[in-house]
Image (cartoon, grey):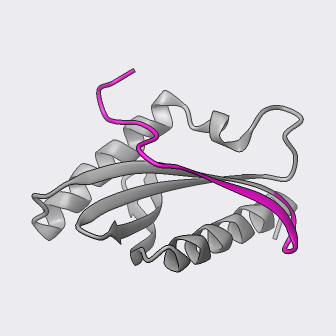
Amino acid sequence: MARHNEVGKAGEALARRYLEEKGYRILEANWRYRRAEVDLIAMDGPVLVFVEVKTRGSDAFGRPEEFVTPQKEQLITDAAMEYMESIGHDWELRFDIISVLFRNEDDYQLEHFRDAFFPGLE
């Protein structure tokens, strides 16, 4: 597996563990709809949360969260709408980003951005 794939998988595992330790209940990991993939779908109490995990080995070209583009937000939103329809969801939802600057399993920085974006707002 390429180094960037390994870094991405490590970041997703750290994000999942972080959320579980905070009391989130993970419903799905790497949920796909058409061209979109939602890294984690979780419940934060009564709130359905769609989480994009961005992991980088260095911040030389910018912080990981800066790589969530408006196009990526739209793909996640489309997938979220499909997921909600498939489970009959009609309560509160949120879009979060977890940024991981990963050097190794013992040397990383994780930052959680709650309500990082909302569909239709720029």
With 74 as the anchor, is 57 left or right in this view? Answer: right
* Location of residue 118 in the rendering, given as x and y in whole percent from the top left corner: 34, 36
Q: Which stretch did the figure color magenta?
A: 102-122
Locate residue 73: give its quadrant.
Answer: top left
Name the outermost residue toward the top: 122
**Number of dots carrying numbers:** 0
Q: Residue at x 56, y 73 (%)?
A: 16
With 24 as the anchor, is 13 left or right in this view? Answer: right
* Location of residue 110 in the rendering, given as x and y in whole percent from the top left corner: 70, 58
Q: From this viewpoint, is residue 62 visible?
A: yes
Q: Is residue 113 magenta?
A: yes
User: Viewer-proximal residue, 60 or 18?
Assistant: 18
User: Viewer-proximal residue, 84 or 32?
Assistant: 84
Q: Is residue 121 above or below residue 96?
A: above
- Image quarter in which the C terminus is found: top left
Q: Is residue 10 above or below residue 91?
A: below
Q: Residue at x 39, y 56 (%)?
A: 50
Q: From this viewpoint, is residue 35 visible?
A: no
Q: Is residue 116 magenta?
A: yes
Q: Residue at x 26, y 53 (%)?
A: 93
* Location of residue 33 in the rendering, given as x and y in whole percent from the top left corner: 35, 57
- Image quarter in which the N terminus is found: bottom right
* Location of residue 7 in the rendering, given as x and y in whole percent from the top left corner: 79, 63
With 114 as the anchor, is 93 left or right in this view? Answer: left
Q: Residue at x 35, y 59 (%)?
A: 49
With 29 as the anchor, is 90 left or right in this view? Answer: left
